[in-house]
Image (tube, rainbow, N blue to C red):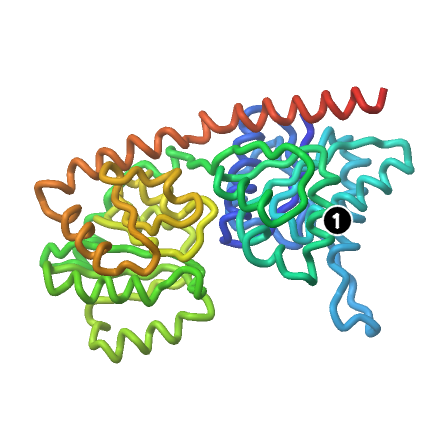
């Protein structure tokens, strides 16, 4: 099958999932064409079935904001026609679903009929999409998609609750490439961070308010009074400078390190003992799944799709949003030397349930259903 994938090319969850899906499809023998404004960060290996098409956005003095959506639709039209695509799979509704709808109409006028699948990832529904500036377009373009998927049951429910969606939404969870995340300890790295055998705690995010990084700091502040430990914060975003100031005010800078954005996150996770995700909202929790794949137990809030991933008392623990004391109690329990090996083994076992080899067939089967249904409508 020839598939066009449209996504954001950054480190964000939707872009990572879309890129990893495209790579897995290419390995399975499908021809995959990425269409976006720059090469996706995770598109890091060569395969004869992989193609990349950059969306060109010409500058023009009249435009205060360059019309990316129009340029994207045009590129979709060119690629679909020239490559003979069987379908377009767009990740993150804004603006990809509406751009795909426009491209589909232009192609239909040329006698080319191509189905569109939209995958909903989270904030395109739970945050940005609900804004009155976008909601009518988001609702319309999702309903005009030939197939709709969501990464969790929670996100599926949120979509129906907040938008007038009239079509079925298929839940296909996020996945992990276990070959990439196989635990390979970098003992020299752990020794540099934890020279006295301290426990290593990790948090990764885009440093936004919804991630509740203040809670991460409060958890760590209380935890380090109970046992020797260090904290690594991976990522960047608008809250980073404020969090650095908070760590300084709490005299924690000797025990906290800010690593910025990292592509090879598995190298950090491979030596971690615990992962924290106290988010106010998570449609799935891809970063937590990456931790599980590296045998790292997780402490998370019970928000959104996290209870669908984190098995309470098995892979880690779930707490109410903002319940720092409960998270500290559970973290100390996990980090006890008698308990930690069991939680680590459970973490990897859970991650195996989301291996790309198990999830990819669900996408392939869904593609076939949507393409066949589209052909039946044409006839």
Q: Residue 295 appears at what percent x and percent y? A: 26, 39
Q: Quadrant of residue 109?
A: top right
Q: Nearer the viewer, residue 115 or 321?
A: 321
In the rendered view of the protein, which quadrant contains the N terminus? Answer: top right
Secondary structure of the residue carrying numbered label 1: helix
In the rendered view of the protein, which quadrant contains the C terminus? Answer: top right
In the depicted structure, whether residue 148 falls above or below residue 238: above
**Viewed as shown, does residue 326 lie left or right of 173?**
left
**Viewed as shown, does residue 173 lie left or right of 50?**
left
Residue in view at x 44 percent, y 65 percent: 209
**Viewed as shown, does residue 343 lie left or right of 322?**
left
Q: Nearer the viewer, residue 188 or 218?
A: 218
Residue in view at x 66 percent, y 22 percent: 369
Q: Nearer the viewer, residue 24 or 63?
A: 63
Q: Residue 273 appears at what percent x and percent y? A: 21, 48
Q: Residue 61 appears at what percent x and percent y? A: 82, 74
Which residue, given by chain and number where applicable, does mark 1 sit on? 99
In the depicted structure, whether residue 207 falls above or below residue 288: below
**How many numbered discs sit on the rendered protein?**
1
**Viewed as shown, does residue 3 lie left or right of 263?**
right
Residue in view at x 41 percent, y 30 percent: 355
Q: Nearer the viewer, residue 271 or 291?
A: 291
In the depicted structure, whether residue 367 falls above or below residue 58: above
Q: Residue 125 appears at what percent x and percent y? A: 58, 51
In the depicted structure, whether residue 83 falls above or below residue 192: above
């Amino acid at each position: 099958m020839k598939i066009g994938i449209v996504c954001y090319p950054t480190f964000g969850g939707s872009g990572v999932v879309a890129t990893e899906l495209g790579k897995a499809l290419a390995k399975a023998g499908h021809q995959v064409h990425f269409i976006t404004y720059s090469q996706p960060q995770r598109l890091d290996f060569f395969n004869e079935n992989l193609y990349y098409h950059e969306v060109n956005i010409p500058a023009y003095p009249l435009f205060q904001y360059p019309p990316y959506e129009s340029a994207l639709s045009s590129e979709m039209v060119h690629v679909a026609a020239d490559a003979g695509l069987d379908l377009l799979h767009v990740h993150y509704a804004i603006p990809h679903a509406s751009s795909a709808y426009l491209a589909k109409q232009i192609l239909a006028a040329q006698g080319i009929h191509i189905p569109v699948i939209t995958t909903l990832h989270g904030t395109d529904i739970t945050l940005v999409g609900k804004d009155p500036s976008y909601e009518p377009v988001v609702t319309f373009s999702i309903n005009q998609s030939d197939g709709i998927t969501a990464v969790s049951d929670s996100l599926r429910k949120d979509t129906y609750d907040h938008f007038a969606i009239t079509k079925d939404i298929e839940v296909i969870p996020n996945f992990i490439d276990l070959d990439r995340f196989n635990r390979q300890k970098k003992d020299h790295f752990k020794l540099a961070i934890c020279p006295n055998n301290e426990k290593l705690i990790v948090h990764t995010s885009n440093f936004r308010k919804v991630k509740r990084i203040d809670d991460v700091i409060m958890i760590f502040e209380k935890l380090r009074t109970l046992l020797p430990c260090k904290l690594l914060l991976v990522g960047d975003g608008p809250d980073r400078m404020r969090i650095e100031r908070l760590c300084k005010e709490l005299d924690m800078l000797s025990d906290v390190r800010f690593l910025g954005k990292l592509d090879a996150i598995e190298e950090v996770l491979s030596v971690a003992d615990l992962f924290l995700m106290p988010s106010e909202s998570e449609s799935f929790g891809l970063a937590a799944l990456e931790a599980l794949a590296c045998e790292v137990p997780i402490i998370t809030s019970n928000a959104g799709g996290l209870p669908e991933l984190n098995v309470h008392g098995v892979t880690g623990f779930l707490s109410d949003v903002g319940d720092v004391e409960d998270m500290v109690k559970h973290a100390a329990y996990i980090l006890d030397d008698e308990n930690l090996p069991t939680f680590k083994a459970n973490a990897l076992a859970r991650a195996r349930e989301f291996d790309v080899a198990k999830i990819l067939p669900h996408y392939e089967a869904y593609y076939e259903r949507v393409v066949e249904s589209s052909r039946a409508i044409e006839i």
